[in-house]
Image: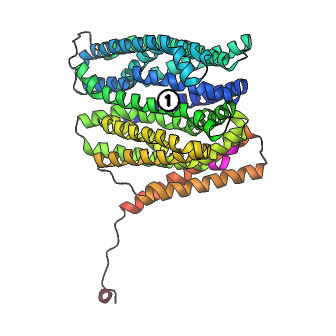
Amino acid sequence: MTKRKFLLQGAVLTAVSLFLRVTNMGYRSFLSQKMGSAGMGLYQLIFSIFMLTVTLSTSGISLAVTRMVSAAIATGRREVIRSTVARCFGFCLTISLSIATLLFFLAKPAATVLLGTPQAAPCLRILGVGLPFMSLCTCMKGYFLAVDESLSTAFSDTVEQLLTMGVTFYLFWRFAPQSLEAACFAAMLSSTLGEMSSFVCGWAAYRRSLKRNTPKRREQASGVLQGLSHIALPCTLSSAARSALNTGENLLIPKELQRYGLGYSSALSQYGLLSGMAMPMLYFPSSLLSSFASLLIPKIAKEREQDHRRTVAHITGKAVGLALAFGMFFSGVFLAFGDSWGMAFYNSNAAGTYLRVLAPLAPLIYLDVVVDSLLKGLDEQFNSMKYNFADSLLRVTLVLCLMRFFGMESYVGILFFSTIFNASLSLHRLLKVTQVRLSLMGNVVLPLACAVLSVIGGKALLSCTGIVQPLWASAVGTAFSAALFAGLYTGSSRLWQRAKKKPAPARTGQLHDL
């Protein structure tokens, strides 16, 4: 992939990802208005259980397909690509159908024991129907990423999102579900139909792509199972363990809040405000990074395959520096305009307050998105597995030990400690493997100063124009701050690079000066 194609494809993917995140925020806003914060809490808990089954069915498969297809392309063996992906399809279908069957029969006990409401069982069953389609889409995503055709994935994701939203709007308009469980079922049914449509679009694009990227002569791929064991198995074990712990954590939070003294509905509301409203807003800007980060996986894998160490170090340094700068800017934006964001999307001051409190985590969260992709491309998924598992285990332990005594405030503290812990380990491993050194001035001080100045400028603009309507205030303030930050950061970075390259003046003795 050329630099121009990388930037162009990354820009298109970022635009699509941003569109999907914006529409998803609007979708969640619609659901929150229909179901309330308690309904959003139940919605989030149901998805927490489902995400464990998704992890078992799909985790690591996309990376394995990307790595194996990228290796085949790098070594000039395109004739084995079709066989490689087909065997991965068979593996995914076997696993996902088995897990979907288990979910169907265990849905009622799971809903009764874990959610405390057996009426939520149909929600789990209907989500299980979409599991095989989701698993096959994950395989195709890995293939498209390896052959530089990620736009096909973006198109199928867009179709899925639009269909999910359209069906949800229709079901709420036509049937107006009254109970929380019925409202959640309508949303889950829409999600499953969206997964099916995504598979249909992705499959059509995959068949066309094979004709362009593989020769007519075909060969049976060897070592696919070994590749899946080496690449996908650590990711699956890591993600499954982490997902199980995350699911346990999400289920524990309302229960621990009840032990703290809150009622069931109040506990669900508190959980819904943080996990269902504030956290999606905090992760929302990561869509601007995730597209480029995903493109780095095949790029860094090919450079590693060809032993281009200096190129790997250069890509790593650039990616980490930009991720830190990006996170610092949005940390400032959330601190300055968090209340407006909360009111604009959810009409909730509490959601905006949570967003402002969590704002300092933005640089580490967004950095982790990039670091995780780089580690996967460098065959470091096993170390990533260890860090993620340790992080999740630590969070569950702290939830059990602290929340019943200190309530939701302690969970915010747990999020801070956990994020710092995980990001520190991952970043240290990446820098050690690539032998990259970060600069305190260039990577921390300069972007932080630019972020502070840009959000001050954004607040000043809103004061001068008198804009107070939440949606316009958050949009105008963020957009103006972003433009100001881009100019300040670009200019200061160039000056800093010139200062580093400029040779220091030779020191002369005092007698010579005289």
Quarter occupied by the C terminus: bottom left
Tell me the residue at 70%/18% (across/down): 179
Residue 243 pos. (x, y %): 45, 30
Q: Name the residue under label 1.
A: 247
* Residue 37 shown left or right of residue 227 in the figure: right
Q: What is the crowding at mark 1: few (fewer than 14 residues within 10 Å), some, or many (at least 20)? A: many
> Helix, strand, or loop for circle 1?
helix
- Res. 163 in view: no
* Residue 106 shown left or right of residue 29 in the figure: left
Question: Magenta part of the protein: which range?
Answer: 334-339
Tell me the residue at 29%/50% (across/down): 435
**Residue in the foreground of this view, choosing between 496 and 157:** 157
Tell me the residue at 32%/51% (across/down): 436
Residue 71 pos. (x, y %): 26, 27
* Residue 362 shown left or right of residue 271 in the figure: left
- How many numbered discs? 1
**Residue in the foreground of this view, choosing between 443 and 246:** 246
Residue 457 pos. (x, y %): 66, 54
Above or below 377: residue 62:
above
Kindly identify the amino acid type of the residue bearing the numbered disc 1: Thr
